Image: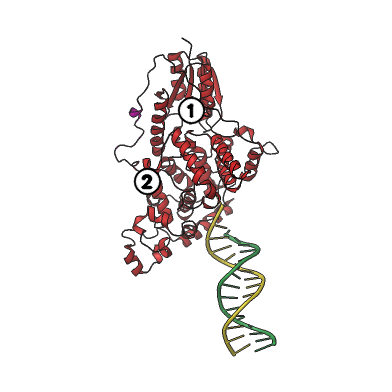
Chain colours: A red, B yellow, C green
Amino acid sequence: MTSPALCWLRQDLRLTDNAALTAAAAAGPVVLLYVLDDTTPGDWQAGGASRWWLHHSLMRLAAEVPLVLRRGPADKVIAEVLAETGASSVHFTRDYAPWAGPLERRVKAAAEAAGAACHRYGGFLLHEPESIRNGSGEPYRVYTPFSKACFATGEPKPLKPAPRLTAWTGNIKTDRLEDWELYPSRPDWASGFAAVWTPGEAGAAARLKRFIRSGLADYAEARDRPDREVTSGLSPHLHFGEISPAQCWHAVRRAQLAASGKLDKPAEKFLKEVLWREFSYHLLHHWPQLPVEPFRPEFNGFPWRSDEAALRTWQRGQTGYPIVDAGMRELWATGIMHNRVRMIAASFLIKDLLIPWQAGERWFWDTLVDADIGSNSASWQWVAGCGADAAPYFRIFNPVLQGEKFDPDGSYVRKWVPELARLPNEFIHRPWEAPQLVLAEAGVAPGRNYPHPMVDHGKARDAALAAFQQLKGAA
DNA sequence: TGAAATGTTGGGGCG
DNA sequence: ACGCCCCAACATTTC
């Protein structure tokens, strides 16, 4: 029997445009392996929402191709599988998490020890982080020139079609997916997820198609509006590699060239968002401490508060600020939160409550289906003002004004904070200003069925600015 | 990919 | 008719 090629699947759970899989298929019968590795990421093993997604994504994939499931440290598992199958090569898609580089070196060593060739491919990003440098050969620290450099490198490589796979016919043991218990059982907090999401490669392709058909035209103007369904919703699919950024790029390009003959505004805006994801990984690659340490070290001296009760109030969407609570509840119910609302909710935790950004980052890590070590850490640092090319610390969101600007008739708030649903538009983002009569008519009883604001934003803003002054004084 | 404070301008009311 | 004040509306600056 010809010796098989081992394809180690990771955050590339797709058959099309998968360079590792294509190369493995060309090398021989393929053993497709997914390893659930909770040891290597240390503190950053996949959170609850992420595991729910992974379960469904693997289920879909296993329905298409024979999949070997194993659990344990990936390098050890790969060494075992090489011994069991006699595979003569290992192929995998590169991962850019801080723990992934060392792991990939251990895998290479294990492969070589077994006499197998080891090949690594790109695809999770458009550009390898090492390849984008500024004029003086340094990594970029500012988004705009970074994105220009990306655009200047030209179009991503042509896409690879799904390869024809020859399944390996040998015997190999595999775990049962159900036994991994990746989905919740006791309280089924994910019951609302399935209404919103279809994990897997087909779901990703459908989502992209739908976005191009019905969201893209208004994307530039309406992407900040949580009350509209305009965003692509591709982030979890991209995180798990059910679709590649190159596939998204080419599809949007093609649609726009067909429509107008040139790259128009909505398409450019979308591609720039894809490049924010790229920029996050660029920063993470060159600064592996990004998930834990402020990029600007002076923020280590920031006078954060420790307030477990306030953190829980925020997590549960009971802050008393409707737009914040709507976002936090959307997150809990669906595993996603609209990007604009993420900024507002994050700003509230960091600046109104003075709770360290890492606490919010952890909560998002556990609750987001698109939890991603690059985007999550870079974005929290951006809001906190301690990141590279970040919003300045003194840029503090006013949750009332943001709500009125981006959810003007309150329909987003009404959807996720139903106890406020009958308030008139005028008060939907500031219920504490509503007269008694209006509250009574809307069935809102402040402090009883909807909380009073947990802080006064005006005072909280002053306190945040004072804390920032203290930081500057110390520097 | 803010918001508040402060500054400037210009039209209208009014003595 | 004129100057003064008020204050929106807009612009700039500061946090």
Numbered circle sitting on residue A15: 1
Please state the horizontal and vertical placement of residue A140, each as a whole percent of the image: 63, 40
Element class at badge 1: loop
Asked if badges 2 and 1 are on one and the same chain, I answer yes
Residue A155, compared with residue B11, is above or below; it is: above
Let me know if residue A142 appears in the view.
no
The chain containing the residue under callout 2 comes to A
Let me know if residue A123 appears in the view.
yes
Look at 51% across and 20% down and name the residue there: A25
Q: How crowded is the residue under tag 1: few (<14 C-alpha within 10 Å), some, or many (20+)?
A: many
Q: Name the residue type under label 1.
A: Leu
Please state the horizontal and vertical placement of residue A76, each as a whole percent of the image: 45, 21
Residue A451, compared with residue A220, is above or below; it is: below
**A394 with respect to A40 (left or right):** right
- The residue where tag 2 is placed is A333
The chain containing the residue under callout 1 comes to A
Q: Name the residue type under label 2.
A: Ala
**A418 with respect to A297 (left or right):** left
Res A446 quadrant in image: bottom left
Residue A419, compared with residue A363, is above or below; it is: below
Of badges 2 and 1, nearer the viewer stands 1
* Magenta stretch prevailing secondary structure: loop
Furthest-left residue in this view: A186
User: What's drawn in magenta, residue-wise?
Assistant: A174-185
Residue A180 lies in magenta, yes or no? Answer: yes
Instruction: Please report whichever mark, 2 or 1, sits nearer to the chain's N-terminal start.
Output: 1
